[in-house]
Image (cartoon, rainbow, N blue to C red):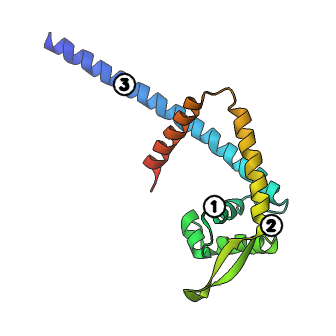
Amino acid sequence: MIGAMEDVRRDDVRRDDVRRDEAVRGLEHEIGRLLRRVRRGLTDRAAQVDPELNATAYPLLATLAEFGPHRASDLADMFALDKGAVSRVVHQLLELDLIERTPDPKDGRASILSVTSKAQARLALMVEARREEFGARLSGWEPEKIDELAQGLARFNAVISD
């Protein structure tokens, strides 16, 4: 009798393991789809800010707009990019008049990067359009379900954070 109960428990554990593996595979699949959409979205958002803006520059610009002025080296650390790549992005953003460079008062050798009023205005329009689009796409969702998704993503982001 005890042996039969142990067999049942082992079978339950195996079924739970199989369900967990299937759930993780499903999650990986959906994350892959989301990442592909995000990449396309970055290209679209960059073009909305400026048709010449490279999609790789958009996240750095958006970060400066959201979190305020930073040094290029800070951006390199945030995005795990080499300084050369950040330098190329900064050059493009300067050429498009989307950021400005000022001397760092703490270190005369470095510069502080900040968004221009032109960039702020264009980003504000793009953010408003994006929020309207999200609202339209989620119009059939109950607010509680949107909250559940946001909370689930927050937990997931916390788990995968460095």
Q: CA distance from mark 3 to mark 1?
A: 42 Å
Q: Quadrant of residue 9?
A: top left
Circle 2 SS class: helix
Q: Nearer the viewer, mark 3 or mark 1?
A: 1
Q: Which residue is at the far right? A: 51
Q: Which residue is at the far left? A: 2
Residue type at mark 3 is Asp
* Mark closest to the chain's N terminus, 3 or 1: 3
Residue type at mark 2 is Lys
In the picture of the structure, the residue carrying the numbered disc 2 is 118
Residue 5 place in picture, x, y as percent: 20, 14
- Judge left or right: residue 41 versus residue 67: right
Name which residue lies at 31% across and 24% down: 13
Q: Residues within 10 Å of mark 1 (few under 14, many from 20)?
A: few
When the figure is inspected, residue 48 is found, relative to residue 105, above or below; the finding is: above
* Mark closest to the chain's N terminus, 3 or 2: 3
In the picture of the structure, the residue carrying the numbered disc 3 is 16
The number of numbered discs placed on residues in the rendered structure image is 3
Q: Quadrant of residue 2?
A: top left
Residue 64 place in picture, x, y as percent: 65, 66
Residue type at mark 1 is Glu
Q: CA distance from mark 2 to mark 1?
A: 15 Å
Residue closest to the eye, 35 or 119: 119
